[in-house]
Image: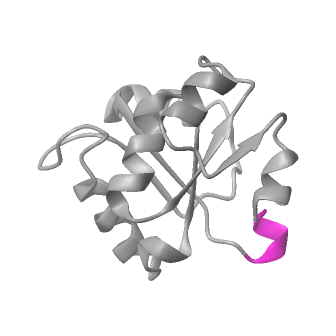
Amino acid sequence: LSALGLRLAVITNKPQPQTEQVMALLPGAPLQVVWGQQPPFAVKPDPAVYFHVCELLGVAPEETLYCGDSDVDMLFAKNAGAKGAGCLWGVRDEAELKAAGADYLAKAPLGILECL
């Protein structure tokens, strides 16, 4: 995705220190922003942090694709006015992701390319 010139970010409900520990396991990951749960933002599906990260990236939410593996992630994308891609290799199944309003479904990480 970064080779295509896309700006990438992580937004998670995990606390920021835990998020940083996990991201340290992926040295060199081409991410512009990594945002864990921290003040002043509420947790997903509240869209305030999405708007903040989009501002940091210089993009409008409606120009983005949010990829996640839960109903909360799909609601988060919808609340922010973004498209949501349900990742089927995660914790929830296709039926739950569709019911939560997934715009796209990706069966594997490379499937995200098809969602674009």
What residue range appears in magenta? 1-5
Residue depicted at 55% across the width and 68% down the height:
64
Position of residue 75 measured from the top left corner of the image (x, y, whole percent)? 39, 43
In this view, the residue in front, 9 or 90, is: 90
Total numbered labels placed on residues in the image: 0
Most common SS among magenta residues? helix
Q: Quadrant of residue 81?
A: bottom left
The foreground one among 96 and 9 is 96
Residue drawn 54% across the image and 76% down it: 63
Horizontal and vertical percent position of residue 23: 56, 36
- Residue occupying the far left of the picture: 40
Q: Point out the image quarter for the C terminus.
A: bottom right
Kindly indicate the quadrant of the structure image that contains residue 45.
top left
Decide whether residue 89 is among the magenta residues: no
Q: Is residue 76 above or below residue 63?
A: above
**Going by the image, does 103 lie left or right of 89?**
left
Please tell me which residue is depicted at 72% across the width and 42% down the height of the picture.
Answer: 105
As displayed, is residue 21 above or below residue 44?
Answer: above
67 relative to 80, above or below: above
Residue 50 position within the rendered picture, expressed as x and y whole percent measured from the top left: 35, 58
On the picture, is 34 further left or further right than 50?
Answer: right
Pick the quarter of the image with the N terminus: bottom right
Left or right: 11 as drawn, with respect to 31: left
Q: Position of residue 51 (x, y in %)?
A: 31, 66
